[in-house]
Amino acid sequence: MPVRLFLLLLVLVAGSAPAQEVAPPLVRAPEEPEAPSPPPSVDAPVRLVPGADVRVETRSERVSGAFRLLEPGALSLQVDDERVETLLLADVQRLSVKKRAVLPGLVIGTGAGAMGTALFAAFLCAVVEDAGSSLSCGLVGALIGSVPGAVAGALVGLAVPRWSTVYRRAEPDDPPAQVEEARPPPSSAERWFFHPGAVGELGLRVGYARRLGGVDPQGGQGARLHLLALLGPYLALGPELALYARAGSETLIIPGGGVFSQEEPLFQLGAVTRVGVELGRVRPAALLGLAWYLGQFSYIGYSVGAEVELRLVEWLPLAVDVRYHDNVQNLSVDPRHLTVGLGSRLSW
């Protein structure tokens, strides 16, 4: 009896227990939408200073000129004195700006100066006995020659420009070029260095050089060539070289009687700085130079003078100059010269 009662109670308890809930079938949660990819990066706008030399390439032509005006969706270039050409920005495939090649000139000048001086020094040490090894002389020569080579290369790079690409369309669906008009740099130094317009000048002039002082001063005709970097409308600097016949001659009185005379040309290699101002078609300027002179004597000297440039015809400027040359070394003689010249120059 007790056993039956216990089983009956167990059945009643089990029947009264709540039925276990059945878990619903697994359902894959809907995937969250992917975040939209960021828009393609837009290149920074090209900033052009009015007057800067610009070259534009389209599918059908290449146009070069001075940047004049920015219009909605187009830019205008002053191609020549009488023609302005407007180009749509949507048609531009490549846009380049003329810049100074200072860094390339510096690198090339340093390498050329170091290599040339190293070879020359190694050759001298190989010829002269007990002068040391050619390798060590070459290394010393490379160190010495790299400095003037770097200076000369930087000056040439200032005067010789290069085209720097500021925009290029790689694919047909690439966005068109974005151009903004920029103001010239505010400071005077920056405006002189980065000014739009011509950056270099090549000048040639013929003239006459005469020795000042001495027993029998002589002179002769010659020519002068310069390559100047135009740093704004007032300042220009760069290398120059000149050669004058008989201007390096010297006549010496030998103690005890007798005169020794030898005719030599005068060679000059150095740098010149020009500071001037434009007054319409006339530009007066002051000249200051430092150079190595070679004639009967070899010495370092300076020159001071003035020039006047006259532009009666725009494509053929005429310039006349007068310069005084003197040495800065303590020599047994005092070579001094006066030169006059007349010539023209080409700027770009």
Image (cartoon, rainbow, N blue to C red):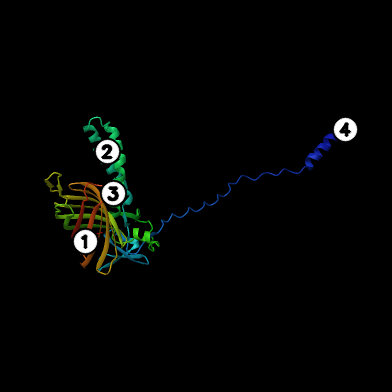
Mark-to-mark CA distance, 3 and 4: 122 Å
Please rate how many residues cluster around mark 3, counting C-alpha atoms within 10 Å: few if below 14, some from 14 to 19, many from 20.
many
Query: Which numbered dot is residue 118?
Result: 2
Verify CB contact (< 8 Å) between mark 3 and mark 4. Answer: no
Q: CA distance from mark 1 to mark 3?
A: 24 Å
Q: What residue does disc 1 label?
A: 321
Tag nearer the camera, 4 or 1: 1
Identify the secondary structure beneath mark 2: helix
Identify which residue, 227 or 40, lies in the foreground.
227
| Occupied quadrant, residue 17 | top right
Q: Is residue 81 above or below residue 259?
A: below
Which of labels 2 and 4 is toward the front? 2
Disc 3 on helix, strand or loop? helix
Residue under label 3: 152
Can I make out residue 124 in this image? Answer: yes
Q: Are marks 3 and 2 in contact (CB under 8 Å)?
A: no
Q: Earlier in the sequence, mark 1 or mark 2?
A: 2
For mark 4, give the secondary structure.
Answer: helix
Circle 1 or circle 3, nearest the eye: 1
